[in-house]
């Protein structure tokens, strides 16, 4: 068992290292940060000096090695654009993304399950059919378009909700939260819907088809024959059995909510790590790009590692194979 | 009780008053250090916080700021600046000649991005606490014009915070904090998120604005910024996308302010003999002949570009500077005329037909840059020229130009000094790293007479003689078609209709001219 875990951890570290190498080899194609850092009246000497200072005159493998050397000591370098430590910037931005992901995740799960159950039970009703058709639009429209439509409707036309940003935030022990102010909560509504809409439709359609499947089972008919109320049949017997595959999918979608956040954050000028990353690409802010990509790959690799190890606990055959 | 109400008001978000002003910018100033980055977003913003010896007024003319007056010394050995007395920095320290000396040393240091402003300066001498002599190695009539963005920093403050020199690489205290003498002071700074300012109570000047607090938020997505303006979440955005300007004007809550920027958009050409091309592979001298460049000039229908892509918001350019600049050559004010037949004839005569022109273009640097390049590509094709357009983000663009990977390219130039000498120095001179000349002359255009005239222009005190030489240079550049000037880039700002402000051609947003009704 121990050797299995060690092997898996080793593989994960290897994957991380390769991801980093690929990322660093790509940075050359993103462009040259020097022109963004120097003004119109710079000379070639200024360009060469700064390039040397930043180590950009070195091949990417050397740059990568230097990054790793610093990163294992917890130092992610200084942002070219902001002149501040990247670690500090990421910590400052993380709460915005995590809060947004949390709220849209909850929205997707609650609304998805509720609508899924509703459309399964009333599958011939008009309302259910309307919901199913509208959900198709929700899946097919790109996120940025949905975001802009929502802004147009609720901010520009109706003026109910803010068009961008997080509203007022309160600092609780270094964590800036938007949950404690009215404007912070209002600001969460549109981005959360935009970000969670796709996952919501996914969950809704999954719940619906699973539920329809379950409702055809013999034990449901038997329950009906026993004279149980519809409510008990639908929610105690059918829904519970529907949830097994749904929970698996929800778990898998967690990571993609954070990944999809990049687009939503750009549309709503949501000050999270996704927006930071997009701006870093435009400026060729290599330290920020590197740290973000490494952070995301660490996250995904860690999730996979945990899943692998859990499988090993559940399924003894894997242990033997290792 | 008072504190409780304030806290409550903050929580409920009802503390807003009419004079609270929110504005959005596309680029957050990357530094609060006035000497670290010589770029419009940084200098434009810091003009509200820091001040120089001189400043530009609403009409771009030079006016007294921290210097009350200045006069040339002797026969042009330098300039004497008489400093304003009783000026304090925002931390309370007094402004005097020592700060000018310090700011000179700091801004002209190797670590600074502004050192080129001081290339003509040989020495800065403190005469007394409120008099400073800036000596130049040659007579320099436009020196006061060239230092309008040279901002004064307190020597004591910089020393106390370890920021005696700018630090572009690691950043220092002055990257995140500011202490100027300007009319606004920074009360909080969250890079990339928001920056708040308040009027500086101890400012020496007469207050014109009625703002009590200002918040600047970067919004990169143009659609989001537009929505924020229409819904009233922000009071000012810059720029308004050109294609939305007309629609926005119809909205009674919002007004669109249009003007002409100082930036001239032009085409440049590879004019070096035997230049290497990665795209074309090998040597390509198609634009060595001025007639080949003239073919391009005749083929591009600038009025059509302005009408369709710029929606009538820009005006055609005849030379490297716009008419609003000092030293504009009225003698050479006629832009190249569109003449498809002439273009076709010249293209055939010079052998352009049958070759592929590698045309490089940025796609996120100037207003609608890629669309303009596509239109030019189509226009050249109509005149029989085969163009391979390659549009790319600006971060990839400059390295490509520096590597000479082009036959033709698009460039915008905004003269920092607002004088016609500026583009001659950077675009018209033969590239010479040692003399810091021609550093943006990617095509390697070279004319001995222009190289000879430039130092004479720089040191000529007599305005008439100076203008005659500027006219001569503009004439040479036009005759030889060194560049094909296309148009002067428009400025399109959007504000709430209850806001009054002044739009300056350098695209600086000056808060002390803003009033909210």
Image: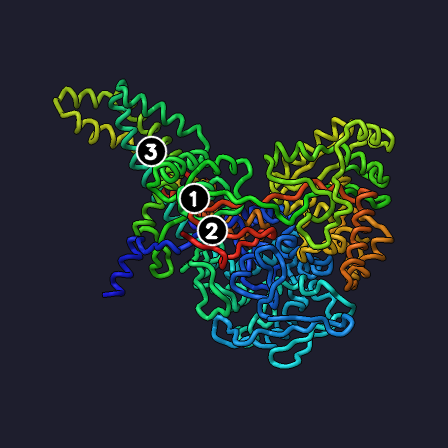
Residue at 62% over, 48% down: B261
Task: Specify whether disc 3 shares its chain with disc 1.
Answer: no
- Quadrant where the image shows the N terminus of chain B: bottom left
Q: Along the horizontal axis of the image, is B187 left or right of B340?
A: left
Image quarter of residue A149: top left
Q: Secondary structure at mark 1?
A: helix
Label of residue B203 in the image: none
**Whole-Å distance between the Cαs marked 3 and 2?**
56 Å
Residue B122 visible in the snapshot: yes
Q: Along the horizontal axis of the image, is A89 left or right of B55?
A: left
Label of residue A246 in the image: 3
Label 3 crowd bin: few (<14), some (14–19), many (20+), radius 10 Å: some
Q: Position of residue B476 (x, y in %)?
A: 83, 47
| Mark nearer the viewer, 3 or 1 | 1
In the displayed orientation, state which residue is furthest to the front. B464
In the rendered image of this protein, does residue B286 appear above or below residue B507?
Answer: above
Label of residue B500 in the image: 2
Q: What residue sits right under mark 1 in the picture?
A: B228
Label 1 crowd bin: few (<14), some (14–19), many (20+), radius 10 Å: many
Q: Position of residue B299 (x, y in %)?
A: 76, 32
Q: Nearer the viewer, residue A317 or A226?
A: A226
Q: Nearer the viewer, residue B15 or A249?
A: B15
Task: Specify whether disc 2 shares its chain with disc 1.
Answer: yes
Residue at 31% over, 26% down: A208
**Whole-Å distance between the Cαs marked 3 and 1?**
38 Å
In the rendered image of this protein, does residue A108 appear above or below residue A222?
Answer: below
Image quarter of residue B253: top left
In the displayed orientation, state which residue is furthest to the top. A124
In the displayed orientation, state which residue is furthest to the left. A227
Q: Nearer the viewer, residue B100 or A194?
A: B100
């Amino acid at each position: 068992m121990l050797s299995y875990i060690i092997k898996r951890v080793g593989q994960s570290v290897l994957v991380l290292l390769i991801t980093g190498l690929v990322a660093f080899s790509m940075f050359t194609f993103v462009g040259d940060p020097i022109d963004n850092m120097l003004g119109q009246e710079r000379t070639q000497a200024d360009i060469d000096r700064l390039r040397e200072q930043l180590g950009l005159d070195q091949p990417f493998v050397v740059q990568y090695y230097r990054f790793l050397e610093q990163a294992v000591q917890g130092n992610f370098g200084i942002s070219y654009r902001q002149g501040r430590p990247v670690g500090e910037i990421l910590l400052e931005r993380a709460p915005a993304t995590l809060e947004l992901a949390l709220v849209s995740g909850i929205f997707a799960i609650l609304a998805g399950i509720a609508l899924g159950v509703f459309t399964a039970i009333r599958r011939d009703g008009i309302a259910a059919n309307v919901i199913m058709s509208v959900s198709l639009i929700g899946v097919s429209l790109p996120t940025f378009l949905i975001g802009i439509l929502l802004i147009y409707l609720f901010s520009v036309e109706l003026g109910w909700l803010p068009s961008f940003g997080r509203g007022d935030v309160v600092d609780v022990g270094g964590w800036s939260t938007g949950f404690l102010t009215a404007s912070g909560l209002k600001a969460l509504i549109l981005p959360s819907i935009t970000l969670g809409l796709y996952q919501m439709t996914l969950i809704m359609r999954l719940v619906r088809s699973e539920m329809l499947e379950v409702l055809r089972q013999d034990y449901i008919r038997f329950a009906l024959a026993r004279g149980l109320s519809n409510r008990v049949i639908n929610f105690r017997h059918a829904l519970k059995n529907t949830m097994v595959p749904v929970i698996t999918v929800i778990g898998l979608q967690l990571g993609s909510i954070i990944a999809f956040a990049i687009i939503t954050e750009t549309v709503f000028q949501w000050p999270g790590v996704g927006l930071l990353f997009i701006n870093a690409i435009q400026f060729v802010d290599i330290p920020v790009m590197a740290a973000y990509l490494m952070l995301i790959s660490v996250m995904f690799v860690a999730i996979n590692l945990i899943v692998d190890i859990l499988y090993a606990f559940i399924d003894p055959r894997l242990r033997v194979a290792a | 009780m008072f504190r409780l109400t304030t806290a409550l008001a903050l929580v409920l978000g009802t503390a807003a008053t009419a004079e609270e002003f929110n504005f959005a910018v596309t680029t957050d100033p990357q530094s609060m250090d006035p000497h670290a980055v010589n770029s419009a977003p940084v200098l434009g913003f810091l003009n509200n916080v820091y001040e120089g010896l001189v400043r530009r007024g609403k009409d771009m003319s030079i006016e007294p700021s921290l210097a009350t007056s200045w006069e040339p010394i002797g026969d042009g050995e330098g300039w004497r600046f008489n400093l304003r007395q009783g000026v304090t920095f925002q931390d309370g320290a007094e402004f005097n000649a020592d700060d000018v000396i310090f700011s000179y040393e700091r801004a002209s240091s190797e670590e600074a991005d502004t050192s080129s402003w001081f290339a003509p300066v040989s020495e800065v001498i403190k005469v007394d606490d409120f008099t400073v002599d800036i000596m130049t190695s040659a007579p320099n009539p436009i020196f006061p014009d060239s230092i309008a963005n040279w901002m004064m920093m307190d020597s004591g403050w910089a020393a106390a915070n370890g920021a005696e020199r700018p630090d572009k690489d690691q950043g220092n205290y002055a990257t995140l904090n500011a202490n100027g003498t300007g009319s606004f002071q920074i009360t909080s700074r969250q890079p990339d998120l928001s920056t708040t300012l308040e009027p500086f109570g101890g400012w020496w000047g007469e207050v014109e604005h009625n703002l009590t607090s200002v918040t600047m938020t970067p919004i990169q997505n143009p659609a989001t910024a537009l929505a924020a303006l229409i819904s009233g979440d922000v009071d000012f955005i810059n720029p308004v996308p050109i294609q939305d300007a007309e629609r926005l004007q119809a909205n009674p809550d919002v007004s669109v302010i249009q003007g002409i920027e100082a930036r001239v958009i032009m085409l440049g050409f590879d004019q070096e003999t035997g230049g290497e091309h990665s795209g074309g592979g090998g040597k390509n001298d198609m634009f060595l002949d001025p007639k080949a460049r003239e073919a391009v000039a005749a083929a591009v229908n600038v009025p059509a570009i302005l009408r369709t892509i710029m929606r009538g918001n820009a005006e055609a350019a005849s030379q490297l500077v716009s008419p609003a600049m000092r030293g504009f050559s009225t003698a050479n004010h006629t832009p190249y005329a569109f003449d498809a037949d002439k273009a076709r004839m010249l293209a055939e005569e010079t052998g352009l037909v049958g070759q592929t022109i590698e045309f490089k273009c940025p796609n996120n640097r100037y207003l609608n840059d890629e669309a303009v390049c596509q239109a030019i590509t189509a226009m050249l094709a109509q005149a029989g020229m085969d163009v391979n357009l390659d549009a790319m983000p600006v971060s990839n663009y400059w390295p490509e130009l520096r590597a000479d990977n082009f036959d033709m390219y698009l460039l915008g130039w905004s003269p920092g000094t607002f004088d016609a000498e500026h583009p001659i120095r950077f675009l018209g001179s033969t590239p010479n790293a040692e003399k810091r000349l021609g550093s943006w002359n990617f095509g390697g255009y070279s004319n001995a007479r222009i190289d000879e005239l430039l130092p004479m222009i720089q040191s000529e005190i007599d305005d008439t003689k100076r203008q005659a030489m500027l006219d001569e240079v503009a004439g040479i550049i036009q005759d030889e078609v060194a560049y094909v000037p296309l148009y002067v880039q428009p400025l399109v700002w959007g504000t709430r209709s209850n806001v009054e402000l002044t739009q300056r051609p350098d695209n600086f947003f000056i808060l002390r001219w803003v009033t909210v009704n």
